[in-house]
Amino acid sequence: MFKRYENWINGLEWDWSISRERHFGIPIPLWTCENCDKIILPDEKELPVDPVETKKICSKCKNIAKPETRVLDTWVTSSLTPQIASSLFNNKVRVPYSSRMQAHDLVRTWAFYTVVRSYYHKNEIPWKNIMVSGFVTLQGEKMSKSKGNVIEPSKVMNEYGADALRFWAASSKLGEDLDYNEKDIITGNKFITKIWNASRFSLMNLESYKEKKVNLEPFDKLFLIKMNELVKNITNNFENYNFSQAKRLTDSFFWNMFCDNYLEIIKKRIYNNLGDKTQSAKFTLRKLLINILKLYAPIVPYITEEIYSNFDNKSIHTSSWPEYDKKLKDDKFEKLGDEALEVISKVRKFKAENKKSLKEHVKITLSNSKLEIFKEDLESVCSADIFFGKEFKIEF
């Protein structure tokens, strides 16, 4: 995008025409004496002023001056948006701002003109970063009112909700256009239902639970390690405006790690009072769910706010962002844990191929004796008896 900006500057061959002959726009505040060609400007205290509605007399000829009927080009005022924003806060907030968000079709206009105005007025660039997005297309073509190929966001929100629309929009990559497809909104709607149901299950089993220090069970430790790494990656992506990657990684953890694996692994410990083992599951479940809600909050603010209200009277959007803890990192243990998760995956595949229910009991022989620490949870989630031998094997 910078190359596009640079090419525009280097290719300029004309001056900027700052006036437009249009009905709408900010009037150019000046008058011209038709007798002596004197240009009359208003005092600063008179601004804003429409010259057509205000009479001016030429001090030299004493004639009534002719008002300017043209208006300012859109970019004359749009290029002052950083200064206008500052004025709304009594100029306590000043440029450079942290960032500007805009689409790529405005690189040569809004971005360029704003930089020019700031540079000549303040001798500085108006933002530290500029985030350039694409725009929404319909069947590959840019939406346009004149063409009539427009989808009204209000209609989509009325049918599917704002969160479903935002979930779809967050899939867009920096600088790339995003094609509108209703099935993608439906996918967002299904996600809202899924996170609501997963949270309801969790909250039901966390009722009256009070967090306290626990000795973590191996799988609980594994998932907290994975969440910790996720927090690091998501924070990185958001700080670099790469929200589509942040969403993709959070989606993968929520669906694959949390829903498909963790909730299934802990069911026996959650449903039965197994003392410290149950406390470990509840501690981890609470931690994982709260962090998942916070990571999703910038993308789907409404459903996350509603669910989070069960944990805190304050808004999720004013709560602290999850922090990465480098002390939690344990590559060796995570590798062993991944092997344990692979066992679950292989058992599910084995039962599916044999057209058996997931509850069908099996016998599993594991070749890695280090997986002993995961044995109890593995037997529960796989509905299996586990033995250790020379070769990995699953049988009915």
Image (cartoon, helix red, strand yellow):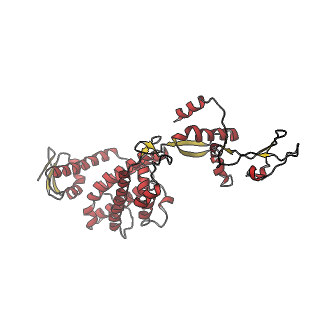
Q: Position of residue 188 (x, y in %)?
A: 38, 54
Would residue 86 appear left or right of 321 to someone viewing this image?
A: right
Q: Position of residue 326 (x, y in %)?
A: 42, 47
Residue positioned 84% across, 48% down in the render? 57
Name the residue nearer the viewer: 192 or 12. Answer: 12
Image height of 81 relative to 280, above or below: above
Q: Position of residue 247 (x, y in %)?
A: 41, 49
Quadrant of res 254 = bottom left
Would residue 71 appear left or right of 9 to someone viewing this image?
A: right
Q: Is residue 320 visible?
A: yes
How many labels, in total? 0
Name the residue nearer the viewer: 12 or 155. Answer: 155
Would residue 220 appear left or right of 28 to someone viewing this image?
A: left
Q: Position of residue 108 (x, y in %)?
A: 57, 37
Quadrant of res 304 = bottom left
Image height of 201 relative to 178, above or below: below
Residue positioned 52% across, 40% down in the render? 105
Residue positioned 45% across, 41% down in the render? 176
Q: Is residue 162 visible?
A: no
Name the residue nearer the viewer: 125 or 107. Answer: 107
Name the residue nearer the viewer: 118 or 32. Answer: 32
